[in-house]
Amino acid sequence: MRCGDLSLAIQAVQHIRRMRGGAQGQLMLGSDGHPYVVKFQNNPQHMRVLANEYLASKLALAAGLTVPDVDIVEVGEWLVENTPDLEMDLGRSHERCAPGLHFGSRFMGGLMPGQVVDFLPEEFLLSIKNLGEFAGILALDKWTGNANGRQAVYVRTSRERKYRAVFIDFGYCFHAGDWKFEDAPLRGVFYRNDVYREITGWDAFEPWLTRIETMPAETVWEAARDIPPQWYGGNQDDLEALVDKLLKRRSCIRERIEEFGKSDRKPFPKWDSRAGTAARVLWQPEQKGSTIGNRVM
């Protein structure tokens, strides 16, 4: 996909139902046979949350974290005009969902009831297959300056007894529509300390933390180049500035995690203080040669 190429976008062919959440996403069936949670350009939060979702999801996938596959979904005028539920509730008024290119996140667990849930009691939460990934997604949320709490759903097949966490909702990374970074210890973290209880040191954040800290700049630029310009008003300078800042932030992720660890939440009760300060990953800026438009990185 390059800059929202219509010929490569997934076509929405059927509306299924509304989804909860501030962006008022819609569950829709794609032309590839998969259901997608579609967030529209004219959502009540901000147009840029689509770009945020796409970029942060791609970075999470590159780090090996469990997130849904994402794509660009085209919703045609006919489908909008003939589907009454495709509208935005703006409080005092309603607005039809805009046709065009929108963000699509693969709906996890399929459409069978009971295969995906958004809450687990403590005894089930602590036994999920990938509990350790909450440390990895914390590193990513601190990197991307997620201004919202960490969201997850829990998925299992009909033959499985245990759930696995799937991390969703990256719209408030980069401070939503502001595209800036305002770090605070309790931003971008999961609301329950249970998931951090067994973290004893920096080893718990591996391999994800090192993958993020050493992620090639080209990987980040590649994901940014695929974002349709409509999702950020076509202002390429703003997108390039965002990526530049993001790349520089790789060296301070551990500091942001330490600030959370020292907060009143006390999320890491088993942290081994004898381990000392965090080992820093030494990296050198990549050689120039990555481009977006006419820009040379």
Image (tube, helix red, strand yellow):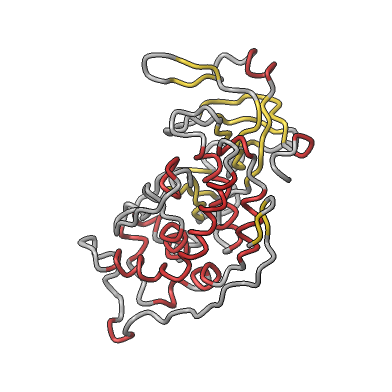
What's the residue at 49%, 49% (across, down)?
A: 154
19 or 247: nearer the viewer:
247
What's the residue at 30%, 64% (across, down)?
A: 260
Picture coordinates of residue 62 (x, y %)? 61, 61
User: Quarter-wise, where is residue 270 in the image?
Assistant: bottom left
Residue 50 position (above or below residue 162)? above
Picture coordinates of residue 8 (x, y %)? 77, 39
Question: Count of labels shown?
Answer: 0
In the picture, the quarter occupied by the N terminus is: top right
182 or 101: nearer the viewer:
182
On the picture, is 104 further left or further right than 119?
right
What's the residue at 55%, 70% (across, down)?
A: 211
What's the residue at 59%, 49% (across, down)?
A: 68
- Look at the image and tell me whether residue 111 can be seen: no
Residue 235 position (above or below residue 139)? above
Picture coordinates of residue 267 (x, y %)? 28, 64
Residue reaching furthest bottom?
274
